[in-house]
Image: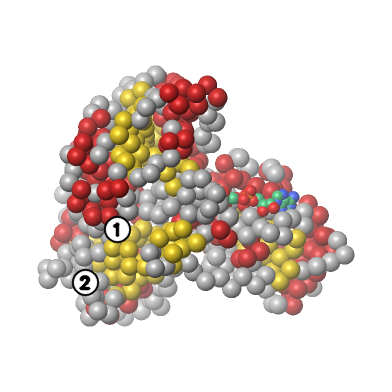
């Protein structure tokens, strides 16, 4: 254990920029490193990512390891895992954090098994145990019905972090840090899973994850037509439309709109839940909303245990009247 | 082509959240009385993924499940859907494992099964939501793996997979033998026809104890855990919903909008 030191976060780079989760990882990693009295490092992996190192320093990193290689242009797991493994072996951190993102949730378990350690995915809370100095890893389990705290004495202690669960630091451009380049030394021959193409499916308008108001519909919408009404309501608020899994599985809305444990995590000011029951797996994606409003015809639905305000009734009668009144209030 | 599908028996994740209970002293979930366990949702979709390839190209599907006190009607469901064989790693020693000890036992069983082209797993189990066992098996076997598949097609020994990402999907190619984890976007699993249920009733599962797959009991289940569960608890909910009334639903909806303005929510 003596050989392992400090905290390392693996940054997420999306379309040439540090993703929001990277700042959240740095914020959380900074706290853990300070508690341990050790260093916080970041590793950035990709093609043309070197220029982002300074930004990671401004957000809290003491050192930034950069693995920059054209072969890392698109996410290909075999090369990515090799690149990150190399950096981790150079840093030898006690704690290794990644984001619970498209890349992180695929890469982290590969890496954990390669490094012969264990991993807690989708953590919402991380802390240092005052006695053992081990990482206390808190994550939702049973679809969000319960939470579990794990520890391990295998090094590095690995966790992925749920988006929006941690706060980023205010960037400080005057912060000093060291940038270390790690040659990737990988070639095409390690690629077993070959990237062919990416197909974007995002709906136009405000991004669901960033929307201040989210209007979500569930199985009770009964078809794609109902979602048009939700779309109109969302537009009044300059918000976005979300959905539950059955709405996606039925093909009423694209899968990019799914909110929940296996969908997107949203933390809007207002979440309007229409004709959805409020399953724990769905709430896992929206319980961070400031205010939840429910429209459901079943007074016993679980959503009424989660919402701040609600009406009991058929959305077909409720929505048009609600929309009109909202329009009037927002105009006046 | 030959397929292996790993499935897990779990407490029904769709049981009402209000019925969910934790025994804090034992750090364990108390299964809701009268609610039978099920095959974890995504694992059933993994069975569906294998069946679609079998429908198109022929082959054999072996279902593999690890646990203890496995309910036969539950773990036989994949057979009723159309899978061919069932191997159970069933022993008290396999209980309460973590992702590592579970993936290790399953990988050793897969070595014993021998030949296969594709292993399918669900993206995560509906109880612990750990999301690692599939990838772990592939790493331990040293075979390539793709996660979160929503479409799987094969031609000339190559597998083409569409995998779900936050803003759409990626198309990737992977050689066999390989492991693929699937997500719900693949589509609904098929119903088990009556004929299938009757066929499944006649199939005897093969049962392998730790000794049968060449593992030491210290490496599986609770004994083999590397992650220690310190505490399991239910987060407290305030649960105070203000129900807005009205003369009818439309009227209540108008009152709701007014109330939200009053509370400065909108
Ligand atoms: C491991 C796992 C992961 C999962 N991940 C997710 C996830 O990420 N996101 C997700 O959403 N789900 C997820 N699920 C599925 C989840 O368990 C539920 O099945 C799902 O959220 C239920 O969706 P729903 O509320 O739309 O449907 P239902 O539970 O069927 O609820 C429909 C509701 O609509 C109401 N209703 C019907 N008609 C009307 C009407 N005319 N007017 C008003 N109300 C009406 C009903 O009263 C009911 O409450 C996951 C499940 C598992 C096992």
Viewer-side residue, A272 vs B98: B98
**Residue drawn 36% across the image and 73% down it:** A27
Looking at the image, what colour scheme do you see?
secondary structure
Does residue B44 appear in the picture of this structure? no
Which quarter of the rendering shows the C terminus of chain A? bottom right
Name the residue carrying label 1.
Answer: A119
Residue lying furthest top: B58
Q: Position of residue B64 (x, y in %)?
A: 34, 35
* Front one among A5 and A42: A5
Q: Chain of mark 2?
A: A
Mark 2 Cα within 10 Å, few/some/many (few <14, many 20+)? many
Point 83% across, 60% down: residue: B250
Q: Chain of mark 1?
A: A
Q: Which residue in the protein does label 2 denote?
A: A6
Q: Is residue A223 above or below residue B253?
A: above
**Count of numbered tags:** 2
Find residue A104 and report its horizontal and vertical position in percent: 35, 55
Looking at the image, residue A279 sits to the left or right of residue B223; the answer is: right
Residue A159 or B228: which is nearer the viewer? Answer: B228
Between circles 2 and 1, the one closer to the viewer is 1
- Does the image show residue A322? yes
Q: Position of residue B154 (x, y in %)?
A: 38, 26
In the structure shown, which secondary structural element does the residue marked by tag 1 occupy? strand
Q: Residues within 10 Å of mark 1 (few under 14, many from 20)?
A: many
């Amino acid at each position: 254990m003596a050989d392992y030191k400090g905290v390392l976060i693996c940054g997420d780079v999306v379309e040439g920029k540090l993703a929001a989760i990277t700042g959240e990882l740095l914020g959380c990693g900074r706290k853990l490193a300070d508690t341990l009295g050790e260093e916080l490092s970041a590793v950035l992996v990709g093609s043309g990512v070197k220029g982002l190192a300074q930004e990671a320093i401004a957000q809290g990193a003491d050192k930034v390891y950069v693995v920059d290689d054209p072969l890392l242009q698109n996410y290909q797991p075999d090369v990515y895992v090799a690149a990150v493994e190399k950096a981790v072996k150079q840093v030898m951190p006690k704690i290794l954090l990644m984001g619970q993102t498209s890349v992180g949730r695929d890469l982290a378990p590969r890496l954990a098994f390669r490094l012969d350690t264990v991993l807690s995915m989708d953590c919402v809370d991380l802390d240092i145990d005052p006695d053992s100095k081990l990482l206390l890893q808190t994550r939702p389990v049973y679809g969000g019905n319960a939470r579990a705290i794990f520890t391990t004495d295998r090094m590095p202690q690995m966790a992925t972090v749920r988006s929006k669960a941690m706060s980023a630091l205010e960037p400080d451009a005057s912060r000093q840090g060291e940038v270390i380049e790690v040659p990737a030394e990988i070639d095409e021959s390690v690629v077993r899973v070959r990237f062919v193409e990416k197909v974007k499916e995002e709906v136009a308008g405000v991004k669901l994850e960033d929307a201040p108001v989210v209007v979500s519909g569930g199985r009770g919408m009964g078809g794609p037509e109902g979602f048009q009404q939700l779309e109109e309501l969302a537009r009044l608020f300059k918000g976005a439309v979300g959905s539950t899994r059955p709405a996606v599985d039925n093909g009423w809305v694209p899968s990019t709109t799914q909110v929940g444990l296996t969908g997107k995590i949203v933390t809007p000011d207002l979440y309007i839940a229409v004709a959805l029951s409020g399953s724990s797996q769905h709430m896992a994606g929206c319980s961070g909303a400031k205010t939840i409003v429910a429209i459901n015809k079943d007074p016993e639905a679980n959503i009424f245990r989660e919402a701040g305000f609600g009406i009991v009734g058929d959305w077909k009668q409720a929505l048009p009247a609600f929309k009109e009144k909202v329009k009037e209030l927002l105009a006046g | 082509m030959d397929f292996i599908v790993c499935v897990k028996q779990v407490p029904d994740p769709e049981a009402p959240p209000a019925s969910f209970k934790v025994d804090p002293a034992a750090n364990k979930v108390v299964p809701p009385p009268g609610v039978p366990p099920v095959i974890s949702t995504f694992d059933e979709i993994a069975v569906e993924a294998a069946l679609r390839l079998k429908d198109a190209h022929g082959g054999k599907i072996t279902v593999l499940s690890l646990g203890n006190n496995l309910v036969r009607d539950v773990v036989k469901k994949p057979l009723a859907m159309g899978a061919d064989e069932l191997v159970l790693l069933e022993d008290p020693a396999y209980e309460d494992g973590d992702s590592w000890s579970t993936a290790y036992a399953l990988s050793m069983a897969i070595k014993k099964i021998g030949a296969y082209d594709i292993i399918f797993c669900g993206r995560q189990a509906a109880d612990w939501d750990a999301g690692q066992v599939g990838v772990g098996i592939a790493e331990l076997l040293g075979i390539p793996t793709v996660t979160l598949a929503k479409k799987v097609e094969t031609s000339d020994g190559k597998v083409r997979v569409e995998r779900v990402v936050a803003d759409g999907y990626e198309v990737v190619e992977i050689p066999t033998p390989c492991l693929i984890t699937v997500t719900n976007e693949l589509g609904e699993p098929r119903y088990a026809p009556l004929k299938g249920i009757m066929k499944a009733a006649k199939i005897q599962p093969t049962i392998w104890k730790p000794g049968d797959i060449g593992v030491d009991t210290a490496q599986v289940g609770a004994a083999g855990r590397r992650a220690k569960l310190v505490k399991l608890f239910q987060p407290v909910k305030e649960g105070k919903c203000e129900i807005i009334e009205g003369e009818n639903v439309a009227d209540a909806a108008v009152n709701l909008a007014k109330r939200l303005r009053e509370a400065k929510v909108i």
